[in-house]
Image (tube, helix red, strand yellow):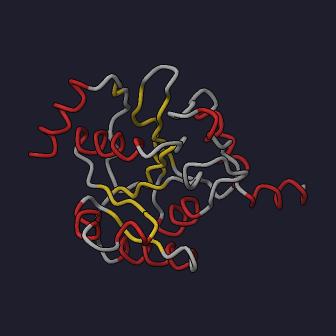
Amino acid sequence: MLRQIIARAFWTVSRWRLSSEPAPDRPSVLIGAPHTSNWDFVLMLGIAWRLGIDVRWLGKSSLFSGWRGPLMRRLGGIPVDRTDPSRVVADVVARIRDGEVFGLVVTPDGTRGSNAYWKSGFYRIAREAQMPVTLGFVDRTTMTTGLGPTFELTGDVGADMDRIREFYADKSGLRPALRCEPRLREENATDSSS
């Protein structure tokens, strides 16, 4: 209740507009893209709290050191050891299979910098946990943020990513120069085998 009151106040005074499809009706991998600023975190909390979505999010382990650890965990954070990223997928899938119910926010374009590829963890988690993906967005050109469609991944990486690219084609992020085109390294293997 308190979180929804805070979120209502935030959206009342914010220059950003919340433009969202309905929240997913079951646990989902929530893609947060383009991820170009630390302010994306505030917008993500505002969206989740306003729509009543219990979220978890993945963050580098250094965010959880010292006094920040309890706060970050309270806000839904799951620390990620970047030296062993494959363990993250297994850990998250295990939480879901153990009955924990949440929306998992993932920023596949990684840190706020221009990368050549998205990280594929979101795809593997969604497939292994049999969760749909929900396309969350930040678009500075229209000053809107929110949730787009929710859909099941098919396992055809190229086709699934084409659908994701189509949705994000006109979304700029807060800092457009840092935007990363939605593309997985795995698509190169698929393209070359065609």
Q: How many marks?
A: 0
Where residue 13 appears, as percent x and y from the top left, is 22, 24
Residue at the farthest left position:
1
- Does 89 appear above or below 149? below
- Does 121 appear above or below 150? below
- Residue drawn at point x = 62 percent, y = 59 percent: 119
Residue at the farthest front position:
66
- Residue drawn at point x = 38 percent, y = 59 percent: 57
Q: The N terminus is located in which quarter?
A: top left
- Does 164 appear above or below 156? above
Where residue 26 appears, as percent x and y from the top left, is 33, 53
Q: Quadrant of residue 85?
A: bottom right
Q: The C terminus is located in which quarter?
A: bottom right
Where residue 103 appears, as percent x and y from the top left, is 35, 55
- Residue drawn at point x = 31 percent, y = 55 percent: 55
Left or right, 169 with reference to 61: right
Left or right, 58 with reference to 36: left
- Does 185 appear above or below 150? below
Where residue 152 appears, as percent x and y from the top left, is 52, 51
- Residue drawn at point x = 33 percent, y = 35 percent: 22
Residue at the farthest top position:
142
Q: Quadrant of residue 6?
A: top left
Left or right, 65 with reference to 180: left
> Is 187 or 160 nearer to us in this picture?
187
